[in-house]
């Protein structure tokens, strides 16, 4: 497991704009920027070392839809900032393309849930340090396909354990009910995953303050993703970067 806590600033892209969804609902979207490249530069200026880029169009369609824009964002933050990219990566070609444009790490969601052997193939091809698997949880089950309620669900922790047995060492665990709500992370959910010993756990969903970041770090999480709180001025990212480094 990693000994360095990673704070990741989220850039969610839909139709070329920076947005956030409430609880993954595409009908409950807030637009925070028309220029993702400018947003990326502003985030990088705070000293944050990771940016988490999600292609929401890709997640919904099942194939990357904004690769060119993501490449521009990666170039904009520069080599000092690592980029983690997800959303619609469901084939080897998709993963290879994301890494080719500069992604330090890719995130598999639906593809890993529906075909765990695909995650194993990505590890064999690129190494476990280049991969994280998204475990997006609602009611104890993991959801894929853009959090479509109609998608086939699987017990979340059991799913993660299966992926861990195939070599996955990093999991982005999102409490869907907390996502975009600015109500704090689901510490019980995170405690369960950290305590399972399956690998590094990155907290996502509801992280909205420096106290939240400290809490998940003290819980044993390897990182935290922050989004809406930055864009609504609830969290000073530069202050959060300093807190995460302490």
Image: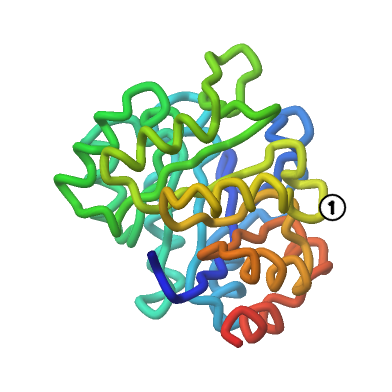
Report the quarter where the N terminus lies.
bottom left
Q: Is residue 228 above or below residue 55?
A: below
Q: Is residue 127 above or below residue 43?
A: above
Residue 183: where, in percent of width, then height?
84, 52
Between 188 and 242, the residue placed more toward the observer is 188
Q: Tell me if 139 is positioned left or right of 61 in this view.
A: right
How is the protein colored in the picture? Answer: rainbow
Q: How many marks?
A: 1
Q: Residue at x 70, y 27 (%)?
A: 139
Q: Quadrant of residue 176?
A: top right
Residue 28: where, in percent of width, then height?
78, 33
Q: Is residue 69 visible?
A: no
Q: Is residue 184 above or below residue 212?
A: above
Residue 31: where, in percent of width, then height?
74, 48
Q: Residues within 10 Å of mark 1 (few under 14, many from 20)?
A: some
- As helix, strand or loop, the secondary structure at mark 1 comes to loop
Report the quarter where the C terminus lies.
bottom right
Between 156 and 26, the residue placed more toward the observer is 156
Between 216 and 11, the residue placed more toward the observer is 216
Q: Residue at x 64, y 52 (%)?
A: 191
Q: Residue at x 41, y 37 (%)?
A: 161
Between 233 and 73, the residue placed more toward the observer is 233
Q: Residue at x 35, y 52 (%)?
A: 169
What residue is shown with label 1? Answer: 183
Q: Tell me if 240 is positioned left or right of 151 in this view.
A: right
Q: Is residue 37 above or below residue 132?
A: below
Q: Residue furthest left?
A: 125
Q: Is residue 64 visible?
A: yes
């Amino acid at each position: 497991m990693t000994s360095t806590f990673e704070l990741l600033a989220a850039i969610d892209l839909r139709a070329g704009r920076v947005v956030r969804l409430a609880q993954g609902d595409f009908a409950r979207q807030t637009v925070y920027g028309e220029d993702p490249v400018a947003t990326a530069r502003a985030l990088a200026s705070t000293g944050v070392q990771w940016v988490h880029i999600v292609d929401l169009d890709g997640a919904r369609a099942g194939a990357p839809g904004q690769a060119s824009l993501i490449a521009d964002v990666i170039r904009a933050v520069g080599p000092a900032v690592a980029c983690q990219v997800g959303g619609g990566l469901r084939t080897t070609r998709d993963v290879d393309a994301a890494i080719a444009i500069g992604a330090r790490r890719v995130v598999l969601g639906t593809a890993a849930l529906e075909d765990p052997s695909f995650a194993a193939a990505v590890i064999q091809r690129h190494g476990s340090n280049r991969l994280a698997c998204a475990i997006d949880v609602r009611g104890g089950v993991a959801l894929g396909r853009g959090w479509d309620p109609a998608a086939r669900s699987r017990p979340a922790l059991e799913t993660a354990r299966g992926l861990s047995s195939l070599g996955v060492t990093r999991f982005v665990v999102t409490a869907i009910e907390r996502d975009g709500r600015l109500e704090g992370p689901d510490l019980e959910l995170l405690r369960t995953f950290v305590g399972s010993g399956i690998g590094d756990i990155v907290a996502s969903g509801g992280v909205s303050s420096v106290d939240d970041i400290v809490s998940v770090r003290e819980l044993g999480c390897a990182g935290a993703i922050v989004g809406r709180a930055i864009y609504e001025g609830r969290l000073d990212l530069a202050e959060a970067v300093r807190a995460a480094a302490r």
